[in-house]
Amino acid sequence: MHDLNVLDTSPEPALDELVEFARQRFMVPTAFISLVAESRQWFKAKAGLDVGEASREHAFCDHTIRQRQVLVVEDARVDPRFMNNPFVIGPPRIRFYAGAPLIYKQQAIGSFCIINKDPRSFSDTDRKDLVVLAKATVAELEMSRARRFLLP
């Protein structure tokens, strides 16, 4: 992730559009692009989320980057990994979570995530679409990096 030099950078309209599209496509109140650093997750783009970062300790995204496929939690209240998570028992009261890892140079650097306050299912088509959004995010991050180095 350090190679991308993206942590704590300004918002990018293309990424903001991707998260807004995800909110509409999946009919959820919240979508975001999370980059996972050593002790925190930082939100590069977000829609329906008021905070700019959160502790990695309780981040659903920390679980997402530990695998190569989409992580789906249909009801966090009954999932042993998350049922006692402060983001489940308190605000924002996450019930549903889906995240696709952002893979850059064979490393998972973050995730493209959607959350909802109600439990729900997630189809194979939904999973594929979330992966497409994650890949588009990585491509945009790479383009942004190239623009920073090529343009004065």
Image (cartoon, rainbow, N blue to C red):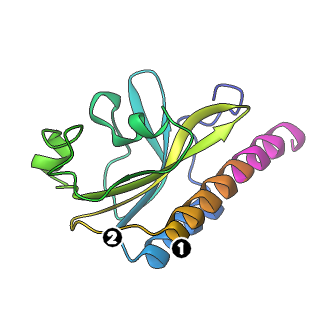
Image position of 105 (left or right of 67): right
| Residue ID at (35%, 30%) | 56
Segment colored magenta: 140-152
Is residue 125 depicted above or below 69 in this figure? Answer: below
Between 53 and 65, the residue placed more toward the observer is 65
For the residues bearing labels 1 and 2, Cβ distance under 8 angstroms: no
Image position of 141 (left or right of 21): right
- SS class, disc 2: loop
Between 95 and 150, the residue placed more toward the observer is 95
Image position of 139 (left or right of 130): right
Residue type at tag 1: Phe
Q: How far apart, in angstroms, are the residues tagged by discs 1 and 2? A: 11 Å
Chief secondary structure of the magenta portion: helix
Indicate the position of residue 18 as horizontal and vertical percent values: 58, 66
Crowding at dot 1, Cα within 10 Å, few <14 / some 14-19 / many 20+, comes out as some
Using the rendered view, name the quadrant where residue 57 is placed.
top left
Residue 73 included in the magenta stretch of the image? no
- Spot the residue most to the top: 38
Quarter in which the C terminus is drawn: top right
Would you name the residue on which mark 1 appears?
21
Quarter in which the N terminus is drawn: top right
| Residue ID at (41%, 56%) | 98
